[in-house]
Image: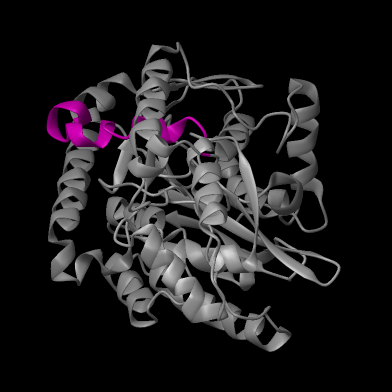
């Protein structure tokens, strides 16, 4: 790192990164990456360096960081090593600052100039060839873990909403199919509000894009009229539009939506990423965020009423995240997983009752200790539906690393009362 680069980061501030523990023999490391996709780099650091990153908060100087290292490990950290760590982080756009700001502005301009929101995960998380993708989705429906062959008890009825995972299709595809079978057999509308989670976080609570979404099965068009009303009433929700470029939680829903909708009638979507904690509605310090959430929800509700036709609300959302990858000190045990499952299903009772506030209170009372990543999307779905009844159709989990870290997810469907 050059002297000028060193002096420009006297109080380094780490961006909102994700991490995963790694083990090679007896040695343990941590893998860092950027969930926003602004940086495509990865960095592997030893545990002692990972410990230091908590002090890259914009409030600790490099001298203070070195002092924390001495306090924790009882040895001096050679300044060159610390500067090299800062240099590696900055080079990979893992630190806030001028380089990250410039990269963000360039990426936003490129995204807004692009004709469509291109599929980011086709060929990686699901098949890129249309015929193979259709076969992959059909396989999710016919899998032994997939939905029952018999007709839904709600067949032919209007449907208000769905919750589906946004986990990898190769693992959770049959759980998606439980939800989308209900849509396939329902009296379905041609307008869908598709809610996803922004894993990189959002300052404004919501991020909307007006881009049409490209998938291997064709183009999914956004609803221009509703997008225009949102721009007029809650324009701040477009400030973080770039978040859509590399986020998978909406993209993973679209092939299923296209599959069950078929070619019978054209559909439009309103794509919305969500990110805010359950304490938004309880913590006075989050007053400004609460106002933005409430302003956006009213704007969207008004826009849907003005549209003059029914909409189905789809939330791509996962539930608990437990284990070392997500910050726990030890891997999950069978007992801790089953306890988590019981808590998940109790929590989802509030969703089945379409009680958004009780859903939020349940998670807040836990201190969000199980890291319910899908909270904001499910909460928004419940607020938009307003009333009716829901049902958990299927529940499952995925293992995400060699330490048995676990993500839980469920499929749900909602109908009028």
**Residue at the bottom extreme of this rendering:** 335
Magenta stretch: dominant secondary structure: helix
- Rendered position, 71 above or below 53: below
Q: Residue, x 24% and y 29% (percent of image)? A: 307
Which part of the image, by quadrant, shows the C terminus?
A: bottom left
**Residue 274 vs residue 13, the one in the foreground:** 13
Can residue 393 be seen in the rendering of this structure?
A: no
Determine whether, in the image, residue 232 is placed left or right of residue 246.
left
Can residue 94 be seen in the rendering of this structure?
A: yes
Q: Residue, x 13% and y 53% (percent of image)? A: 291
Is residue 200 on the magenta stretch?
A: no
Which region of the structure is painted magenta? 230-247
Q: Name the spot of residue 21 as percent of width and height, x first.
A: 67, 64
Determine whether, in the image, residue 36 is placed left or right of residue 411.
left
Q: How many marks?
A: 0
**Residue 232 vs residue 416, the one in the foreground:** 232
Q: Name the spot of residue 309 as percent of width and height, x first.
A: 30, 32
- Rendered position, 101 above or below 197: above
**Residue 2 vs residue 32, the one in the foreground:** 2
Is residue 238 on the magenta stretch?
A: yes
- Rendered position, 265 above or below 165: above
């Amino acid at each position: 790192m050059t002297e000028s680069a060193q002096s420009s980061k006297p109080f380094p501030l780490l961006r909102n990164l994700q991490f995963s523990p790694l083990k090679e023999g007896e040695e343990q490391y941590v893998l860092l990456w950027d969930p926003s996709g602004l940086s495509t780099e990865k960095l592997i650091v030893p545990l002692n360096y990972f410990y230091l990153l908590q002090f890259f908060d914009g409030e600790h100087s490099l001298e203070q960081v070195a002092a924390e290292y001495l306090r924790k490990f009882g040895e001096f950290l050679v300044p060159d090593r610390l500067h090299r760590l800062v240099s590696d982080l900055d080079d990979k756009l893992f630190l806030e600052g001028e380089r990250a700001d410039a990269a963000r502005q360039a990426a936003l301009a490129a995204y807004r100039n692009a004709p469509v929101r291109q599929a980011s995960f086709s060929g990686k998380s699901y098949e890129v060839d249309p015929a193979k993708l259709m076969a992959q989705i059909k396989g999710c429906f016919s899998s032994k873990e997939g939905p029952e062959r018999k007709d839904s008890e709600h067949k032919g009825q209007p449907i208000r909403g769905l919750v589906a995972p946004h986990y990898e299709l190769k693992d959770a595809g049959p759980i998606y199919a439980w939800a989308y079978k209900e849509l396939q057999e329902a009296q379905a509308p041609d307008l869908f509000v598709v809610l996803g989670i922004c894993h990189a976080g959002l300052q404004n609570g919501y991020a909307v894009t007006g881009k049409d979404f490209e998938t291997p099965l064709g183009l999914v068009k956004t609803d221009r009229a509703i997008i225009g009303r949102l721009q007029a009433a809650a324009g701040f929700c477009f400030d973080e539009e770039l978040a859509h470029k590399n986020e998978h939680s909406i993209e993973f829903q679209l092939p299923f939506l296209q599959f069950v909708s078929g070619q019978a009638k054209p559909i439009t979507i309103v794509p919305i990423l969500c990110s805010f904690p359950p304490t938004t509605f309880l913590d006075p310090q989050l007053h400004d965020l609460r106002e933005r959430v409430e302003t956006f929800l009213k704007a969207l509700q008004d826009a849907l009423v003005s549209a003059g036709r029914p909409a189905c609300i789809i939330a791509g959302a996962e539930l608990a995240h437990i284990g070392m990858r997500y910050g726990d000190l030890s891997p999950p045990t069978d007992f801790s997983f089953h306890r988590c499952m019981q808590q998940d299903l109790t929590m989802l009772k509030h969703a089945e009752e379409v009680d958004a506030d009780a859903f939020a209170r349940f998670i807040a009372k836990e201190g969000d200790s199980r890291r319910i990543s899908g909270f904001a999307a499910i909460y928004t779905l419940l607020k938009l539906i307003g009333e009716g009844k829901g049902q958990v159709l299927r529940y499952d989990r995925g293992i995400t690393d060699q330490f048995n870290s676990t993500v839980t997810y469920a499929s749900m469907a909602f109908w009028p009362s």
